Image (cartoon, helix red, strand yellow):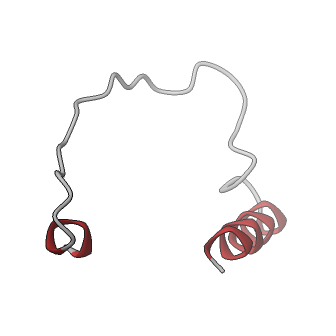
Amino acid sequence: MLAAEAGWTVVEHDVDYRPRTAGTSKVSGSVRGTIVAVRDFWKVLS
């Protein structure tokens, strides 16, 4: 909503999605992975 208020054009695009063929997520596969991901996202946003 902030983007629209700033006059930006907001569009949606369909993306192809396929289930993971092998392996597990490094983020949601463990508590440590989740904590590291949250920390990294927080650094980017601050």
Left or right: where does residue 24 sit relative to residue 17?
right
Above or below: residue 39 compared with residue 7: below
* Residue found at the very far bottom of the displayed protein: 46
Question: Residue 4: which quarter of the image?
Answer: bottom left
Seen in the picture, residue 11 relative to 44 is either above or below; the reply is: above
Q: For the point 16% across and 64% down, which residue is it?
A: 7
37 vs 43, nearest the viewer: 43
Q: Residue furthest front?
A: 7
Residue at (34%, 22%) from the top-left corner?
16
Q: Which residue occupies 19% across, 42% down?
A: 12
| Residue 20 % position (x, y) | 56, 26
Residue depicted at 21% across the width and 58% down the height: 8
Residue 38 or residue 25, whichever sits in front: 38
Number of marks in the rendered image: 0
Q: Looking at the figure, which quarter contains the N terminus?
A: bottom left
Q: Position of residue 10 (x, y in %)?
A: 18, 51
Q: Position of residue 26 (x, y in %)?
A: 75, 47
Relative side of 1 to 32, left or right:
left
Q: Nearer the viewer, residue 5 or 28?
A: 5
Q: Is residue 17 left or right of residue 34?
A: left
Q: Nearer the viewer, residue 18 or 5?
A: 5
Q: Quadrant of residue 30?
A: bottom right
Residue 40 occupies which quadrant of the picture? bottom right
